[in-house]
Image (tube, grey):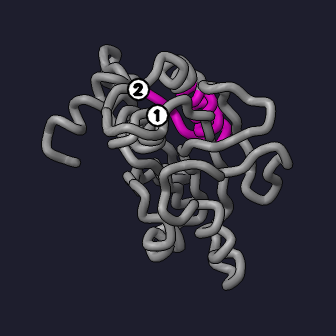
Amino acid sequence: MKILLLGIGNIMFSDEGIGVHLCRYIQRKYRFSSTSHTLDFIDGGTLAERLIPIIVRYDYVIILDCISADGGNAGDVYFFDFDDIPKHISWQGSAHEVEMLQTLTMMDIVGDRPKTKIVGIIPKVVEGTTLELTDEIIKGSKTMEKVLNGHLKELGFEIEVIDEKIDIQDEAYRFGQNGDL
């Protein structure tokens, strides 16, 4: 099965970029192997509907993104299937021009959306131009990492740590300072 790990967010708006930062962090920290699956990593930024031609090439997609949740707090992590989104969760209020929720719904209309899981986190700061992540998001990113790795193991991946010293905030700075903005 072809699996895509898709990081979504605007890295210039603090916590709003956690999906992209975590995707890059996971790719640099681990090596994933499976006899029956492939795993690709894509920084989807805020491209949303422009990602459709890429997403349709996969059998299974795991999206890392910010979400909103009634009664939730900054740093709370949620893992759910797109086909069964809990009623208290939405993707409203992020800095994306067109939300992934709408993009995936458009794909459903024409019947070309692959099986989709979401690992989402409630952001604290989504405005102001900074690469600085809040403490709540840094802490929550560790939970996102555990949830993601647990799910990939369930899918049959073996996971090897290749860089134990990598840090999510350092990764955000590194990404921004390399002129990748």
Which residue in the structure is indicated by mark 1? 15
Q: Position of residue 75 (x, y in %)?
A: 60, 25
Mark 1 crowd level (few <14, some 14–19, many ≥20, 10 Å Cα): many
Q: Secondary structure at mark 2?
A: loop
Is residue 66 found inside the magenta-colored segment of the image?
no
Q: Position of residue 142 (x, y in %)?
A: 53, 21
Q: Is residue 33 visible?
A: no
Q: Position of residue 112 (x, y in %)?
A: 63, 78
Q: Is residue 68 left or right of residue 12?
A: right
How many tags in the picture?
2
| Residue 133: mark | 2
The residue at the far front in this view is 128
Q: Nearer the viewer, residue 1 or 88?
A: 88
- Asked if the residue under mark 2 is in contact with the one under mark 1, i.e. CB atoms within 8 Å, the reply is yes
In this view, 58 is above or below 134: below
What residue is drawn where x is 37% and y is 37%? 128
Tag 2 or tag 1, which sits nearer the N-term? 1
Mark 1: which amino acid? Asp
Q: Which quarter of the rendering shows the N terminus?
A: bottom right
In this view, 127 is above or below 40: above
Mark 2 crowd level (few <14, some 14–19, many ≥20, 10 Å Cα): many
Mark 2: which amino acid? Leu
The residue at the far bottom in this view is 110
Q: Nearer the viewer, residue 99 or 79?
A: 99
What residue is drawn where x is 34% and y is 26%? 132
Quarter of the image where one finds residue 133: top left
What residue is drawn where x is 48% and y is 30%? 159
**Magenta span of residues:** 144-160
Q: Secondary structure at mark 1?
A: helix
In this view, 128 is above or below 99: above
